[in-house]
Amino acid sequence: MSVTTTFLSGPSIRARLGAGEIHLWHLQSSRPGSRGAVAAVLARYLGIAAADVRFTRDARGKPELDVRCGAAPRFSISRAGQVGLLAVAEETQVGVDIEPLGRIPARWAVVREALTERERSVLPTDESSAADAFLRSWVRKEALLKAAGVGLSVEPRLVELRGIEIVAVPSELGTTESWALVDLTLPRHVAAVATENPRAVLRLHGEWPTSVRPRVGA
Amino acid sequence: MTSIPALISDAARREPDGQAVLGSGQAALVFSELQALTERTASALYASRVETGDRVGLVVENGPEAATAFLAVSAAAVCAPLNPAYREAELDFYLRDLGARFVIVSAELDSPVRIVATALGIRVLELRRERGTPAGVFALDGVDTVETNAISAPIPGDDDVALVLHTSGTTARPKIVPLTHRNLCLSARSVAGTLRLASDDRCLNVMPLFHIHGLVAALLASLSAGASVACAPGFHPLRFFERLSEHEPTWYTAVPTMHQAVLERASDEPGLVRGHRLRFVRSSSASLPIPVLEGLERVFDVPVIEAYGMTEAAHQIASNPLPPDLRKPGSVGRAAGPELAVLDPSGTPLARGEVGEVAIRGESVFGGYEGAAEANAAAFVGTWFRTGDEGTIDDDGYLTLRGRLKEIINRGGEKVGPLEVDVVLAEHPAVAQVVTFAVPDPRLGEEVAAAVVLRPGHEVGERDLQDFAVQRLAPFKVPRTILFVDEVPKGPTGKIQRRALAERLALGPLTPGDAAGDLRPRTALENELEKIWSDVLGLPRVGVRDDFFALGGDSILGAEAIARIRDLVGQPDLPLISIARAPTVETMVAEVELGGNGVSSGAVALSSGGSRPPLFFVHGLDGDVVGFAALARRLGADQPFYGLRARGLDGEGEPPDRVEELAAEYLLDIRRVQPVGPYVLGGFCMGAGVAVELTQRLTDAGELVALLVLVDPRIGSASARGSEPGRARPDWRQVVSAARRWFPPRRTEIAESSTGSPAGITRQIEPLARARDAYRPSPVDTPTAVFLSPNHRGGVLSEEERFVLCNVVMCVQVEGSHGRRFHVGAVEELASAMQGALWDLDIRDSET
């Protein structure tokens, strides 16, 4: 996936997804649970006022676009504390995940369970770096599984990665060639975006304060 | 006559053929027969070496035998009636605390008391009814067979203890209240006197007979006047009216929540009360909201007599009088038994109009708690017994209660009686129930808060209610916070405990990490799981019903929790999705216990606590039950809910494609959780057909299925022909891809999606769809409640379904679409409607 950085500023500018594009937005919100920020962004794609964006709630209460809003794009959200990421794509499946660094200690069981043996064998030896490396792996796998829409029914260790390269996936995800990943590094977080279109173009849109401005790549 | 046997023999002498005890569909028991029954039972007990002071536990379902057994046992020894719904732990506590030597249990009752009693070395006697005998007649098995004619039991003295009951301690350990024959008979006579009972009166008893209210006010008061009492199996809002016409009582006594239910039904259907013979209605045991009092008087056109009592007073303390004397709504009336006073903290009686602690003394008042010297020292001052209630007596001698002393809200030095605020808010037309209580406040110490249950269909805000209250109360009494709740949480005895409300409703000092007392882990497994929850979430502790994700968990923390649980229970194949299916400690216990080889199928506990009979609910076309979690939650914590999940969803083969095979598997799953009936079953879409098949099988096995709950059923061959003429059935692949396009399930989604992975749907749906299409059901006459989405086949049952379901007791359309039936936004209405059907199951008696 190739990545460009563009910044559309101003609240009323219409956004348009070009062919094969994925747009990534930073959600500005002091309350991570609010739908207002998501509505404000999606409204630009729908060409309607933010107040007219209708979400229906899925069973958990998470917002989904009401079909009456018209042909709606796909979107994926991930939040970590005050930082929120919203990925928007036209027809392509897309997934995004973000985690703050230093959250999970390397000795936690999930580090063993979510990684394959090979992935574990290449973890750094010192605890702190190992923990960060694990989180990097986690957000890549999460983004992929979110894009595939499989929920918690697929174990993360069924996906094998070598860096950003997808080495093996379970049958629910089709083939390794069908997916692409890109890493994002933020000042205090790691994130990843996954898409089923390997030739997608990732554009960063909107405002990205210095504290959250991402660098592409690990 | 101040002993129970004397009371009965007196009535028998005056009117030997007068009716004493009635039951449903049985001949009435007359006084002479009642006397004979108590005498021969007392003899049999005496012959079995029951001595006068011995405690005899009584575990009998509510009804005529509970009444007659109490009378008979008290004629020989000390009767200790126990709630027939008690489980092992409670029975063990009470039987030990009472020092019981014998226990009488109803032969038909399935109760752990036999096991508990045997373990404690307590002798068990079985109470047996025989067909064709009058109401209340029984025989005891297990008594020593001696010539009972030759032995007559010694007659108890007036000051011998007849009855022991435990107080429903709110914070402290329950204490034993011993009541003598004199206490009980004097109190009974007070009730009879207040109500001017005569031999042509008949009381309909709907109160439990293991608390003082029913025993004294309904049973003993009636018998003391030579009047009769019709013993219902308990209170049921619909059956109440059937009993009203069957027995034609001249009065009944009940607690305010029952009166409220009666009023609601009678207001909806005035025909229900036509032809009643009531001459008054009595209320006691809790404060009766004025609108309910007035409503009842309107509906029945008779006076409603509110009375006040407590166990320690052998029930009646005060009562409003019958006309022509004055009834004062909001007051509990004048002294009507013991002497009544209001004391200051030092124990000095206060003048009329002053507020203090209500105190009583007299021959109907007990002599002190058993084995509780400290409590007695605190409760008795001079000859007075302190009730713990705050109140005031007016110039006419009428007592008005302000609330339990311990529940008075101390707002920066100003005292607010919660009852007073309740009364005011209850007058608002949108309010169905209100409980005022204290919440901690950093500045004032305590502040006033209220929990409100609104009437269905009514909308009102905190502000509106506060404005309403401020016009009727001093400003400092107006609740600062008003919480709207679906139901007021009650304590274990069914009484509302104001002190604990702040914690239960998560106000005040409670942070998500503080667990309320009864939500602490109860078993070793729960304890270990609680540690995992709190450790992973970074909280000091969690309650067993706290939702992992609501406490801040996300997918990575969920994966960590599952990793630790796998380790803990030695199940490396425990699916990751279990944390979504079972996000609480309580439900995870069920998950791991059923896990076995890691394939989670069978009966999945989506809500495992509660005292109602469990609802077993069969999956729809996707085979899964995670989608029902939202429904399970909204049916309330008292309703256990098990989803029956198809095999083969986790990639281990396919589910069977015949309803009969599905039912055979689920039957085992159900029996593992609940070995005997009566059963409550249900299902969604094709699951409804499976539920019908399960009903057939259980019925054939001799079990009772009490209720079938079907949501958007698709039963039988009609479904194969499609819903509307001329419309082709959609190709399932089209349906699935449409779903994927709009509603991609998220990675971090939790237990409430009604679809599994897209791959899962395409693979699993086909066998289940084939099963549905091939099924040819036979008719079932189990009471059935049907709930239909308007867009599901036009919101009606098919002709074949109407043929198969012979006994549809409820069939309603519920707003919402079939495809999102269990999602937030649509599930709430469905849950409400289903509760209506489930509530109609008469399983539980209300308590005093």
Image: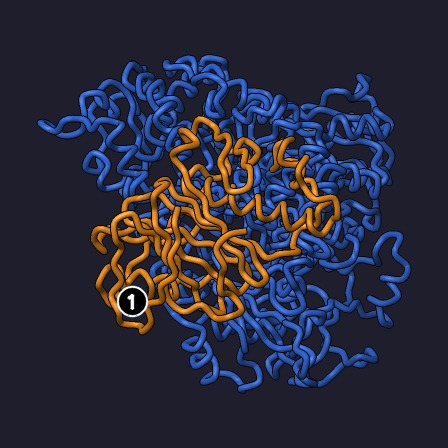
Name which residue lies at 47% across and 61% down: A84
Residue B92 on image: x %, y %? 78, 37
Picture layout, residue B730 above or below residue B202? above
What's the residue at 30%, 25% (across, down)? B805
Q: Residue furthest left?
A: B726
User: Horizontal and vertical percent for residue B520?
Assistant: 71, 49
Residue B438: image quadrant is bottom right
Q: Can you give x and y, in whole percent of width and height, for residue B327 in the image?
A: 51, 71
Secondary structure type for disc 1? helix
Give amino acid for label 1: Ala
Q: Which residue is mark 1?
A: A50
Residue B687, given in percent of the width and then of the height, sits at 37, 26
Neighbours of disc 1 within 10 Å: few (<14), some (14-19), many (20+): some
Left or right of residue B339: residue B299: left
Position of B253 with respect to B292 (left or right) is: right
Residue B505 or B233: which is nearer the viewer? B505
Q: Residue at x 45, y 33 (%)?
A: B625
Which chain wears orange?
Answer: A
Query: Which lettered chain is shown in blue?
Result: B
Q: Quadrant of residue B659?
A: top left
